[in-house]
Image (cartoon, rainbow, N blue to C red):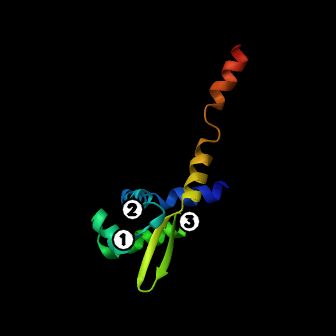
Amino acid sequence: MLEEAAQGFAAMGSDSRLRVLKTLVRAGEAGLSVGEIQERTGIAPSTLAHHLKFLAAGGLVEQQKTGRTVINRARYDRLEELAAFILDECCIDTQRKAANDG
């Protein structure tokens, strides 16, 4: 799981990719076309394609081709896994200290 988490976090590793991902999260399950993402983020089309490819490779975005349009959606299941991974040991040291002090 550590390697998968690292890959997912690495995919978010730029402010532009985070902006794209947050835009897709806001869009919900319907997703957005590349043009809609570009319109909302102001990222140049060629750069946006690179960022979307990186996010998809990291498992954070799924892409579905419908005719000539590619719909991009955030992978909420994957995002929830990453959030759970980073928080799964939240406050354990504090709880151990309290138990030892008590």
Give the residue at mark 2: 20
Residue at horizontal 32%, vertical 75%? 45
Mark 2 residue crowding within 10 angstroms, few (<14) / some (14–19) / many (20+): many
For the residue marked with disc 2, what is the amino acid?
Val
**Label 2, label 3: how far apart the Cα atoms are:** 14 Å
Disc 2, SS: helix
Mark 1 residue crowding within 10 angstroms, few (<14) / some (14–19) / many (20+): many
In the drawing, what numbered circle is on residue 48? Answer: 1
Q: Is residue 50 above or below residue 25?
A: below
Point out the tag, 2 or 3, that comes first from the N-terminus. 2
For the residue marked with disc 3, what is the amino acid?
Gly
Q: Is residue 44 above or below residue 22?
A: below
Please state the horizontal and vertical placement of residue 1, each as a whole percent of the image. Answer: 67, 55
Query: Is residue 76 shown left or right of residue 96?
Result: left
Point out the tag, 3 or 1, that comes first from the N-terminus. 1
Query: Is residue 17 shown left or right of residue 95?
Result: left
Please state the horizontal and vertical placement of residue 2, each as a whole percent of the image. Answer: 65, 54
Q: Is residue 101 above or below residue 3?
A: above
Disc 3, SS: loop
**Label 3, label 1: how far apart the Cα atoms are:** 17 Å
Mark 3 residue crowding within 10 angstroms, few (<14) / some (14–19) / many (20+): some
For the residue marked with disc 1, what is the amino acid?
Leu
Point out the tag, 1 or 2, that comes first from the N-terminus. 2
Q: Residue furthest toward the bottom?
A: 67
In the drawing, what numbered circle is on residue 59? Answer: 3
Q: Are marks 1 and 2 in contact (CB under 8 Å)?
A: yes
